């Protein structure tokens, strides 16, 4: 029976191999540079190239809009089969309109692909302060195996993104890891390193614990106002006193604040949950 192989950090050579193993060893450490300014520069460059080609196309159309040339704008076949000697702009622009359109198509597809990739990278979450500190500490201390220039990317904090999926309870995860780190460590996570300063946790255990705690908290926040209102009512009928209205508003605000602080729920989801 084959034993499950778990990569151990210290078995990798110092330098890029070990740093790569560290970044891949846990979801929290998957922090990389987005190169936002580079993407912006490339997009601007592609955009200007397309703008220039668009100007050329409009100039060709305007030239053919004169008497005698309109049929080349009304029929693509006529334009493709056109005699090159009858094209007035070939002296300054050595290409036909169909040739320009082919180049423009390739250029616009390159631009669109680059634009969508930039949008996808921009949509990635930034690393939490705790995750960033962990990676930074390793790069500066435990890592220490890369030249200073080649590890300088870790200091571009505003340009870093995290590949960590499901970061809904990042804040609560960190608190539980610090308080109950031995419960969330497994033999598999311990086998990843023999460095006592580096700790790995079982994300499934943490996720289950966090979900349980949030469920209990939500139930408590829902049941407390119901119990208090029932106690202050007459014969089990909820009254309409001012203090009852204030109580409902207060617990609604606390419920919304808890959702906002402990989860990554969007604004409309928080509003819908509070209204329900």
Image: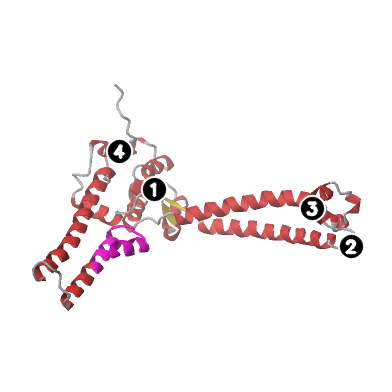
Q: Residue at x 25, y 39 (%)?
A: 190
Closer to the camera: disc 2 or disc 3?
2
Q: Which residue is mark 2?
A: 67
Could you tell me how far apart the alpha carbons at marks 2 and 1 are, in whole angstroms?
Answer: 64 Å
Callouts 4 and 3 close, C-beta under 8 Å? no
Q: Whole-percent x and y of residue 12?
A: 37, 36
Identify the secondary structure beneath mark 4: loop
Identify the secondary structure beneath mark 2: loop
Single out the residue that lies furthest toward the bottom: 242
Q: Earlier in the sequence, mark 4 or mark 2?
A: 2
Closer to the camera: disc 2 or disc 1?
2
Identify the secondary structure beneath mark 3: helix
Q: Which residue is mark 3?
A: 97
User: Around disc 3, counting alpha carbons within 10 Å, would you say few (fewer than 14), some (14 to 19), or many (20 or more)?
Assistant: some
Q: Is residue 267 magenta?
A: yes
In this rendering, the answer to whether 183 lies above or below 258 is: above
Does residue 55 show up? yes
Q: Earlier in the sequence, mark 2 or mark 1?
A: 1
Q: Whole-percent x and y of residue 123?
A: 45, 56
User: Around disc 1, counting alpha carbons within 10 Å, would you say few (fewer than 14), some (14 to 19), or many (20 or more)?
Assistant: many
Quadrant location of the N terminus in the rendered image: top left
Q: Earlier in the sequence, mark 1 or mark 3?
A: 1
Callouts 1 and 3 close, C-beta under 8 Å? no
Quadrant location of the C terminus in the rendered image: bottom left
Q: Which residue is mark 4?
A: 192
Could you tell me how far apart the alpha carbons at marks 4 and 1 are, in whole angstroms?
Answer: 16 Å
Could you tell me how far apart the alpha carbons at marks 4 and 2 are, in whole angstroms?
Answer: 78 Å
Q: Which residue is mark 1?
A: 30
Does residue 34 show up? no
Closer to the camera: disc 1 or disc 3?
3
The magenta span reads 252-276
């Amino acid at each position: 029976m084959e034993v499950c192989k778990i990569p151990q950090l210290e078995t990798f050579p110092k330098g890029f191999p070990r740093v790569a193993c560290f970044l891949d060893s846990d979801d929290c450490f998957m922090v990389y540079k987005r190169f936002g300014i580079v993407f912006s520069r490339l997009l601007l460059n592609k955009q200007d190239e397309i703008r220039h080609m668009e100007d050329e196309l409009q100039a060709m159309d305007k030239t053919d809009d004169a008497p005698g040339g309109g049929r080349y704008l009304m029929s693509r076949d006529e334009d493709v089969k056109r005699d090159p000697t009858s094209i007035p702009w070939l002296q300054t622009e050595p290409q036909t309109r169909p040739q320009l359109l082919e180049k423009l198509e390739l250029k616009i597809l390159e631009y669109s692909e680059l634009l969508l990739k930039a949008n996808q990278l921009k949509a990635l979450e930034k690393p939490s302060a705790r995750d960033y500190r962990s990676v930074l500490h390793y790069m500066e201390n435990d890592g220490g195996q890369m030249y200073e220039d080649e590890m300088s990317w870790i200091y571009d904090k505003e340009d870093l993104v995290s590949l960590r999926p499901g970061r809904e309870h990042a804040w609560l995860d960190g608190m539980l890891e610090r308080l109950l780190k031995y419960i969330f460590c497994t033999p598999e996570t311990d086998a990843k390193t023999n460095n006592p300063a580096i700790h790995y946790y079982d994300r499934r255990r943490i996720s289950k614990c966090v979900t349980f705690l949030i469920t209990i908290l939500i139930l408590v926040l829902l049941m407390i106002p119901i119990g208090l209102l029932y106690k202050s009512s007459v014969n089990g009928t909820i009254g309409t006193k001012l203090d009852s209205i204030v109580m409902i508003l207060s617990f609604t605000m606390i419920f919304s604040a808890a959702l906002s602080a402990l989860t990554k729920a969007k604004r409309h989801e928080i509003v819908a949950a509070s209204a329900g």
